[in-house]
Image (spheres, helix red, strand yellow):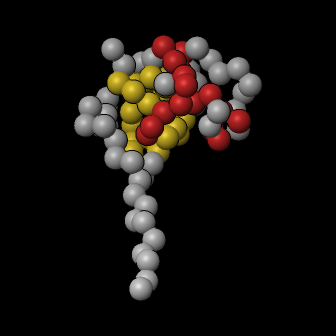
Amino acid sequence: MYLMAEEVTSPKPPKNLRKGSLVRVKREAYQNSLEATASDQFPPDYIFDGPGELLLIKGDYCQVRWRMPVPDVWLRIDQLEAWR
């Protein structure tokens, strides 16, 4: 009997997150991530306060543009939540 490996699927964005949505970064999901270790030791508060605009979704990642003169960033879908 052969065992099939579990199918690995990428997380789908929550239905409330799509192109043009306003988002912010979930602090708990971001802090020990690969993205956090590759960035500044102390991330700027504006990413946690929001809003950033979701520009593009590709696979597990989203491109976010902040409302200030800083570069766009790519973050994992599970690190983002809708801005309130």
Query: Is residue 24 depicted above or below 64 in this figure?
Result: above
Q: As drawn, is 52 to the left or to the right of 73?
A: left
Q: Quadrant of the N terminus?
A: bottom left
Locate residue 29, reporting x and y percent. 53, 30
Q: State the residue lying farthest toward the front.
A: 1
Q: Residue furthest right?
A: 41
In the image, taking residue 49 as reference, residue 37 lies left or right, namely right
Q: Position of residue 40 (x, y in %)?
A: 72, 27
Along the horizontal axis of the image, is 46 left or right of 19? right
Which residue occupies the extreme bottom position in the image?
Answer: 1
Q: In the rendered view, tell whether residue 8 sits above or below residue 55.
A: below
Which is more toward the observer, 4 or 25? 4
Q: What residue appears at the point 45 percent right and 71 percent down from the top-left corner?
A: 5
Q: Position of residue 68 (x, y in %)?
A: 52, 18
| Residue at x-position 54% and y-position 22% | 27
The residue lying furthest to the left in this view is 15
Dividing the picture into quadrants, the one containing residue 84 is: top left
Residue 84 in sight in this render: yes
| Visible residue check, residue 68 | no
Looking at the image, which residue is at 25% across and 37% down?
A: 15
Give the side of residue 8 with respect to residue 72, left or right: left
Q: Residue at x 65, y 33 (%)?
A: 32
